[in-house]
Image (cartoon, rainbow, N blue to C red):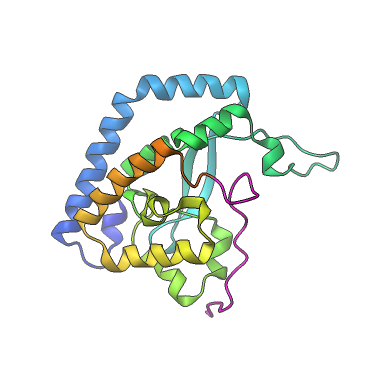
Amino acid sequence: MSWLDHMPRKTVGLRVKRGLDVAVALGGLIGLSPVLTGIALAELAYHGWPPLFVQPRPGLNGAVFHILKFRTMTDARDDYGALLPDRERMTSFGSFLRASSLDELPELINVLRGEMSLVGPRPLLVSYLDRYNAEQRRRHDMPPGITGLAQVRGRNALSWEEKFALDVEYVDTWSLGLDLQILVQTLVTVLRREGIAAEGSATMPVFQGSAQVATA
């Protein structure tokens, strides 16, 4: 089963979107297999075993799946066993993977399995689900994507509120044409290495919730 099976309406456009997901993900995994193998080997040298970062993330309608990414940090811990800050665990190889977005390539497996789409709101932490307000929660009305509207409009240089507003805009205005436009803009953003990290942070600060919190 894929995200399409859980959509309220399986329109022709959504069926085409899923078909493109499968075709691109399968072609990408096959065509990029030498790159994937090379990165996996380098991961062993820089970050050790395992080469992949696996973490539960909420997808369509908040259903949880396990996202696959290449690791960009070590598991270095302090004397008390707590993980060191991201900036101290990020390696030069990890920074390169993030800047080039190559760390996202294993998500093609998630796309092929039907847990993600090529384009959609980025899947965030499960712990954020209870921190969204009612409007922000609508970002889960479309399947999550490897890239999305927020990623081509500023990526991590945006505030959380700005990113969520763009996610909801994508949900409300989705079309195949918009997906294609985002895919093209993603290539430009990656080449320019724009918005890789939030200001003053190695990654994106934790989302603590907006002023209006959703109620059950």
Q: Is residue 100 visible?
A: yes
Q: Is residue 7 magenta?
A: no
* Residue closest to the eye, 46 or 22: 46
Classified by dominant secondary structure, the portion drawn in magenta counts as: loop
Q: Position of residue 187 (x, y in %)?
A: 34, 39
Rendering quarter of residue 84: top right
Residue drawn at x 45%, y 70% as measured from the top left: 137
Q: Which residue is drawn at the image coordinates 86% and 39% (left, top)?
A: 79
Q: Residue at (59%, 46%) from the top-left corner?
A: 203
Q: Which quarter of the picture shows residue 94?
A: top right
Note whether residue 48 is visible: no
Residue 121, by quadrant, is bottom left
Q: How many circles with numbers are drawn on the protein?
A: 0
Magenta part of the chain = 197-216
Image vertical order of residue 32 relative to residue 181, above or below: above
Q: Position of residue 165 (x, y in %)?
A: 42, 67
**Magenta stretch encompasses residue 203:** yes
